[in-house]
Image (cartoon, helix red, strand yellow):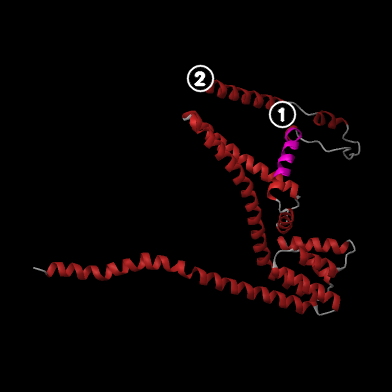
Amino acid sequence: MTAWGALLGALAAAGVLLVAARVRALRRPSLQARVMPFVRDLPAAEPIGRPQVSAAAGVFGPVLRSAAEAVERVLGGTASVRRRLERAGSDKTVHEFRIEQVLWGLGAFAVAAAYGLLRTLGDPGNAISSLIVCVAAFAAGVLARDNRLTTQVKARERRIIAEFPTVAELLALAVAAGEGPVLALDRVVRRSGGELSTDLARVLAEVRTGQPVGTAFDALAARTGVPLVARFAAAVAVAVERGTPLADVLHAQAADVREAGRRELIEIAARKEILMMVPVVFLVLPVTVLFAFYPGVLGLHLTTP
């Protein structure tokens, strides 16, 4: 126990020294703060060379990258991760996502290691089981980040479905008013905000860089994970290429989405019907039966000699 106490004391002292050194470094004015008042009138220059990185990133960056590559070799599924990152609207690369998985795993490992250390202090024979728990916690953290990405994708797609009818109706109104597809798209993107508006802004940027409207919407149909939006983008691409009245197509798409939403609500209500009966059967009905039969039972007891 004396050795463990000395080790913990040394770790605590090292932590206090590191915090004190960092606080002292933060209180010291930086070179930029000391020089900028004298060169404020000079034109700003672009930074030359590689951007500055923190000391922690410089020290632990190679280790994290190696761990991310190891996770990539073990788990695989690069195409699936890239596809889900696109559907989640994230600009991260697969490698950056793997680094986040490693960080989540290390966080879970640290929590499990702290718990295992406390257990080992009380019972030194639990060291092997604590090590197994730490490894399992690291794996759980890595998988938890993957599940978090899937949850983000589903949440974003629900938001897209919720705002799709409004955006489609606005596009239909703008086209019916005499504007072209690009101008109507620009007007809707500038006056709306949301996940679908972000995707349409990307389509608008591709069109303005010289890509045909039909091709840009075809790319949106291939990129999105929402079938309704994919059908909408494909229908707009076909309408632009073949000269079909675009307003009618957009109104029909919005009506289809609203009808699909109503069907989904009916299906959810049908699935929740059994759960809605649980409080009625197990709470309301017994109380009703008790109030109905208790006076009769009490009267029988009173009239029985």
Task: In this rendered view, identify the residue nearer to me: 219 or 304.
Answer: 219
Q: Residues within 10 Å of mark 2 (few under 14, many from 20)?
A: few
Instruction: Report the amino acid beneath label 2.
Output: Thr
- Is residue 86 rendered magenta in the image? no
- Is residue 68 rendered magenta in the image? yes
Point out the stretch of residues depicted in magenta. 57-70
Q: Position of residue 257 (x, y in %)?
A: 67, 73
Residue position marked by numbered label 1 in the rendering:
26
Mark in front: 1 vs 2: 2
| Image quadrant in which you'd find residue 6 | top right
State the mark number for residue 153: none
Q: Secondary structure at mark 2?
A: helix
The residue at the point 52 percent across, 22 percent down is 5
Residue position marked by numbered label 2 in the rendering:
2
| Image quadrant in which you'd find residue 162 | bottom right
Instruction: Report the amino acid beneath label 1.
Output: Leu
